[in-house]
Amino acid sequence: MTLVELGNTTAPPRLVVELELSGRRSLQDRDTVAVVEGARDEETHWAERWTFVAPRTWAHFCPPRGQNDADVGPWAAQRASSPAVT
């Protein structure tokens, strides 16, 4: 995982990370289960970029009574991107 950007001066603050991943990726036809893209049995490598944003106000870091930190969370995924299965 690589920290690409830490935008603590933007509103809302944002964090961009890039992940180097590997595994088996394939896209299958739902009706026939035939592999349309990728390969079921071959490992491949790819990168994904994820953008997280902090809550609108820092008050979210102090959740109301009855809510725990997991309900509001300090960062939320805003966008994720990865290349198409090939």
Image: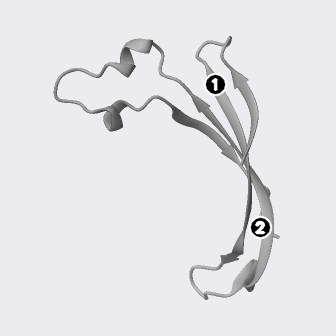
Pointer 1: residues within 10 angstroms few (<14), some, or many (20+)?
Answer: many
Looking at marks 2 and 1 on the same chain, the residue that comes earlier in the sequence is marked by 1
Amino acid type indicated by mark 1: Arg
For residue 2, which numbered disc appears in the image? Answer: none
- Position of 67 with respect to 23 (left or right) is left
Residue 39 picture quarter? bottom right
- Position of 68 with respect to 55 (left or right) is left
Residue 38 picture quarter? bottom right
Amino acid type indicated by mark 2: Val
- Position of 73 with respect to 68 (left or right) is right
Q: What percent of the width, then of the height, locates residue 34?
A: 68, 87
Judge by depth and name the residue closer to the eye, 33 or 24: 24
Query: Which secondary structure lies at badge 2?
Result: loop
- Tell me the distance, in whole angstroms, between the alpha carbons under discs 2 and 1: 28 Å
Q: Residue furthest left?
A: 66
Q: What percent of the width, then of the height, locates residue 36?
A: 74, 79
Disc 2 vs disc 1: which is toward the camera? 1
Q: What percent of the width, then of the height, locates residue 59?
A: 37, 13
Above/below status of 35 relative to 72: below
Which quarter shows the C terminus?
A: bottom right
Residue 71 picture quarter? top left
Above/below status of 19 relative to 29: above
The reply to whether callout 2 and callout 1 are in contact (CB within 8 Å) is no
Q: What percent of the width, then of the height, locates residue 57?
A: 45, 12
Pointer 2: residues within 10 angstroms few (<14), some, or many (20+)?
Answer: some
Q: Which residue is mark 2?
A: 85
For residue 14, which numbered disc appears in the image? Answer: 1
